[in-house]
Amino acid sequence: MVTGDVKLIGSWASVFVMRARIALNLKSISYEFLQETFGSKSELLLKSNPVHKKMPVLIHADKPVCESNIIVQYIDEAWSSYGTSILPSLPYDRAIARFWAAYIDDKWFIALRSILTAQGEEEKKEAIAEVEERTEHLEKAFIECSNGKPFFNGDHIGFLDIALGSFLGWWRVVELDANHKLLDETKTPSLFKWAERFCNDPAVKPLMPDTANLAEFARKLFPKPQP
Amino acid sequence: MAERSEEVKLLGMWASPFSRRVEIALTLKGVPYEFSEQDIANKSPLLLQSNPVHKMIPVLLHNGKPISESLVILEYIDDTWQNNPILPQDPYHRAMARFWARFVDEQIYVTAMKVVGKVGEERDVAVEATRDLLKLLEKELVGKNFLGGERLGFVDIVATLVAFWLMRTEEVVGVKVVPVEMFPEIHRWVENLLDVDVIKKCIPPEDEHLNYIKARMDSLKLKSVQ
């Protein structure tokens, strides 16, 4: 166990916060979790991330680190001798992992979110089609990266597993909202099986939010227009 | 330096800041490479095959294996060729470098594009927004020669987008987006960059570049009128 001054500003419902928490769990780092209240931003958050004013923020020995994927890499580098390696060891594999992590945030997530914000059936159908197409890219990415092993990172969960897997709670919520399978066993069989393995990982299990709770939270965050 | 025979090829575009930053990194490390100028309007089979997801430059091909996305490529170069490191060694400083690089690409670049692409009041709003973002870079430069500290680093290479693209559009757009009175540190940093041989060698030649920017802007204006 690592002792030391580690704090994480976040929320139980945030995908990006979960990434940091999974990484901390993988390294067995104990930390103080500072839960933000929905609807307001704490003094500490505003002071620690003055540029974006967003969570998660990792504060290690009073030094703040922002942006979820940057935090995960920081955790891997600062505690490199602890637990398993989060980033792959070969430069090329690291590049592929970083490429897909950027794709997930820049393209895939945007499409997923647009299902929730879609106005009307037509827009929703288009958003669903986009998510399906992008998820197929991720299926190919999984096959390429895992090379027959259980996770994107190989035998253990790593950077890319965390980047995508942290979305699984919201992925289910959006599926329910869309009334359409978004992680389909027949269309993306490898990802489907990977998802179950990921959720059962001991570093992930205690953090994955309950779908019902998350769905209720989603209704607050993405209110439907009144008829 | 690697011992085995290396084949490094860069699919790029002479006026692209994302392509040029990769050239800066390769040149800084003394890595010999073949540059292949790509026609974006008429994408080559090699480009489409090497970056099927985004179909964009730059793409680095190292012994035939493709790497796309300029920030990913820069980290790959730093991981593979360890001389003249681009990223700092310390994890916290590495995190800071990654943070500021993203800030340049995701915030400054996006807003600066609106300065070029919009007209009238919309452009004024974009100019103000860009200046607000640049004030943060200005603050980062106080007491430093480069964004990387004493020497040129990751953020400097990424922020050449500001020094040699955003600031060059000023002449074409006719707006001083980055006036020296407001941004003395940024101007001092640009002078420092121009003193570095690798930078001088790798940025697009000014006259040609200005003509290119002007032509691009004119074609954008035509499109918005149609």
Image: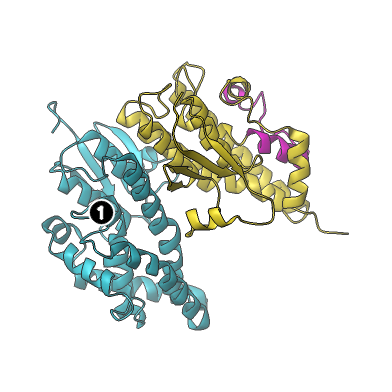
Callout 1: chain = B
Q: Is residue B98 above or below residue B1?
A: below
Residue B29 vs residue A184: left or right?
left
Magenta residues span A168-192
Q: Residue at x 19, y 45 (%)?
A: B26
Residue reaching furthest to the front: A4
Residue B155 on image: x %, y %:
30, 54
Residue A25 on image: x %, y %:
52, 27
Q: Colour of chain A?
A: yellow
| Chain letter, colour cyan | B
Residue A151 on image: x %, y %:
50, 22
Prevailing secondary structure class for the magenta stretch in the rendered image:
helix
Q: Is residue B44 visible?
A: no
Residue A203 vs residue B76: left or right?
right
When asked about the image quadrant of residue A75, the answer is top left
The amino acid on which the numbered mark 1 sits, given as a three-letter code, is: Gly
Q: Which residue is mark 1?
A: B148
